[in-house]
Amino acid sequence: MLITLPDRKQLDKKIEEETRNHIKNHQDEYYLREKLRVIKKKLGELGGKKGTGDNSEIQDYLEKLEKEPYPEYVKKVVKEEIRRYETMPTYSSESNITKQYIDCLMNLP
């Protein structure tokens, strides 16, 4: 099916505009997440506590990690994953996967 030249230009313009908006939204989100990560890091340094997030759940993980005799490599991985988990939006699927991974690590025999 042939598209007339004015229709094609209009279609190209619409596609380009949507693409730019999509990229801009992702860039804005990335910038704000990085800014939030830096702020949380600074708060942790200044306040002497870990980043904000779901503190009760994270605190439970950290307390259990210290009380139980986990191998050092498990402690290291769990702490890294907790840091990642704290920076993720709670509604993201990656956040759920990371939390499940932490739960699995914490429930190893």
Image (cartoon, rainbow, N blue to C red):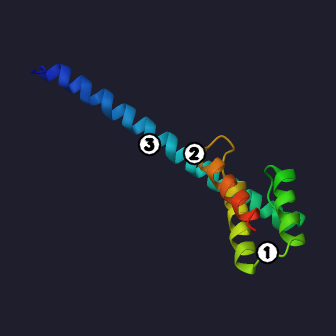
- Which numbered tag is attached to residue 29? 2
Identify which amino acid the numbered label 1 is placed on: Tyr
Q: For marks 3 and 1, give the one nearer the viewer.
A: 1
Q: Is residue 84 above or below residue 75?
A: above
Q: For marks 1 and 2, give the one nearer the viewer.
A: 1
- Which numbered tag is attached to residue 11? none
Residue shown at the point (81%, 49%) measured from the top left: 54
For this rendering, which residue is in front, 88 or 105? 105
Q: Is residue 46 above or below residue 96?
A: below
Q: Quadrant of the N terminus?
A: top left
The percent position of residue 38, horizontal first and vertical second, equals: 70, 60
- Badge 3 element: helix
Q: Is residue 45 above or below residue 35?
A: below
The percent position of residue 31, horizontal first and vertical second, equals: 58, 51
Q: Earlier in the sequence, mark 1 or mark 2?
A: 2
- Residue occupied by mark 1: 70
- Which numbered tag is attached to residue 23? 3
Q: Quadrant of the C terminus?
A: bottom right
Q: What distance separates the C-alpha of mark 3 from that of mark 1?
A: 43 Å
Identify which amino acid the numbered label 2 is placed on: Glu
**Mark 1 and mark 2 residues within 8 Å of each other at the beta carbon:** no
The percent position of residue 59, horizontal first and vertical second, equals: 86, 58
Q: Crowdedness of circle 3 by 10 Å Cα count: few (<14), some, many (20+)?
A: few
Whether residue 20 sits left or right of residue 33 in the image: it is left
- Badge 1 element: loop
